[in-house]
Amino acid sequence: MIMPFEAMLKELEERQAKALAMGGVEKLAKRKKAGMLNARERVEILLDAGSFVETGLFAISARPEVRHKTPADGKVMGFGRINDREVGVVSNDFTVLGASSALTNSKKMRHMKQVTAKRGMPLLFLGESAGARMPDRMGSSGRAISGGADSAEFLRLRKSPWASALLGPCFGSSAWYACASDFVVMVKSATMSVASSRVTSMAIGQETDAQTLGGWKMLSEVSGLVDMVVDTEEQALDALKRFLSYLPSHCNESPPDSPVPDGSDDAARRVLEFFPETRSAVYDMRKIIQLIVDSGSSFEIKARFGKTAVTTLARMNGKSVGIIANNPMYKGGALDADACSKVTDFLVMCDSFNIPIIFLVDVPGFLIGLEGEKRGLAAKIINWMHALPLITVPKITVIVRKSYGKAYPNMGGGLNSDVVACWPTADLGFMDPKVGVNVLHGIKESDDPERFRTLAKEIERDSSGWSLAELYEAQHLIDPRDTRGWLIRMLQIHQMRLERGVGAHLLANWPSTM
């Protein structure tokens, strides 16, 4: 006897099994042998157990000739939770026509972006794709697809965070969404470029390979399009989770609080152990940061790019902060074109998601020269300056040592911060005192050593933190060992109470990458 609805339910079960089988047993086995996770395994690892609700499981290609071999049309999407917070996720299934972009899966993508923006959820992209599905994109009908499914798809008002993981070959949509994301982590075995090395070689008439074109060194050290590089897929997925832990789910709430690890205050008292007494000696600012923030909370962004500046998410007394610092370990901390782009991107992200900004300043100025002019340094400096007054989250500045020239306002000096403190070691000259003697008096140290030293001391004295405090350009002079406590107290004072912790987001539509 046939049960009511038995045939219908059997068909549902069969169609579901076919969709979940992705590109088939052989392709999945090949991936496993190569040590790569498949699209559904990635989702399972990323999300809290049992929380995934898939959308578009039964979607297939709009083209009749491939409808039978396009389960979910090559892109696994849906909603789930990470540490009990709702998120949207797009996981590209390379076993189905290389997860190529086509009419149906573009409609799925559009729906995911609409829902996450409207409902206030982060959106995560697990990248691995072959680019556009050419039969869908060829001819006039292909242009109609682009206009219908992709219109204004990269208009971002930063309603909720976007984050991407590059986990394999990433061309087309995986590259586009990575470049539009707030955070990008890359596995060293992955690649990302506008087109594959084969297509690129044909286009330019010159042989190139995938790593040269879009390998991890190119993307993290040269172009700066990748924020973090890791060895395994599991590490990449963990980095996505950790990144989100510093951000709110959407722009209209404050970032979540976290417990303060034991010993955080004690570590901050050791800061002078890592700071040289000699004013010309270099040191690693990242070690200073790690001591003054909550223990273990520093999460550096773009560590391999623009190394003269440090941009890191961290926590102070359990609350998210964004730290921008100069690092004398590289080029003396002088800001180059890459550092300027990196800092501006970071400012935009912090302001868009209500994260207070802390400047730790030891900057001899901008790295002038022919290379800087070729890279458009002047425009990048002004982009940074343009962004600063539009920021509405608290900005707190600590001048550790040098703050010279035009870099003084860029690094939060003057009216560009809500409050400024100096260490007693602060030096506020327009340039290094020894250079200043040469410029102002035309004297070299070898000409008259005694007079040279006297003039240099005069310039140095006039440029001290005490002088800045006397003019009330700095509101505080602090013992370096008290930096953590002072910052925590300033963050408490400068909370956005009237706006309930939410800024005005005047940079929400700023370009995703500079």
Image (cartoon, grey):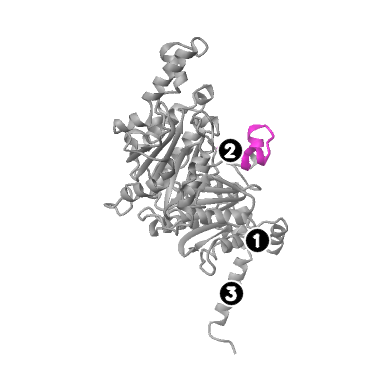
Q: Main secondary structure of the magenta part?
A: helix
Quadrant position of residue 40: bottom right
Q: Which residue is mark 3?
A: 13
Which label number is shown at residue 221? 2
Label 2 element class: helix
Label 1 element class: loop
Mark-to-mark CA distance, 1 and 2: 35 Å
Label 3 element class: helix
Viewer-proximal residue, 87 or 460?
460
> x%, y% of residue 238?
56, 56
Q: Is residue 212 visible?
A: yes
> On screen, 387 above or below 429?
below
> x%, y% of residue 461?
38, 24
Q: Earlier in the sequence, mark 3 or mark 2?
A: 3
Q: Which residue is mark 1?
A: 23
Give the residue type that dot 2 points to.
Glu
358 to the left or right of 49: left
Which label number is shown at residue 9? none
The magenta-colored residue range is: 200-223
Q: Residue at x 61, y 66 (%)?
A: 20
Whether the magenta-drawn stretch holds residue 136 is answered as no
Q: Residues within 10 Å of mark 3 (few under 14, many from 20)?
A: few
Q: Quadrant of the N terminus?
A: bottom right
Q: Residue furthest top?
A: 447
Q: Residues within 10 Å of mark 2 (few under 14, many from 20)?
A: some
131 to the left or right of 339: right
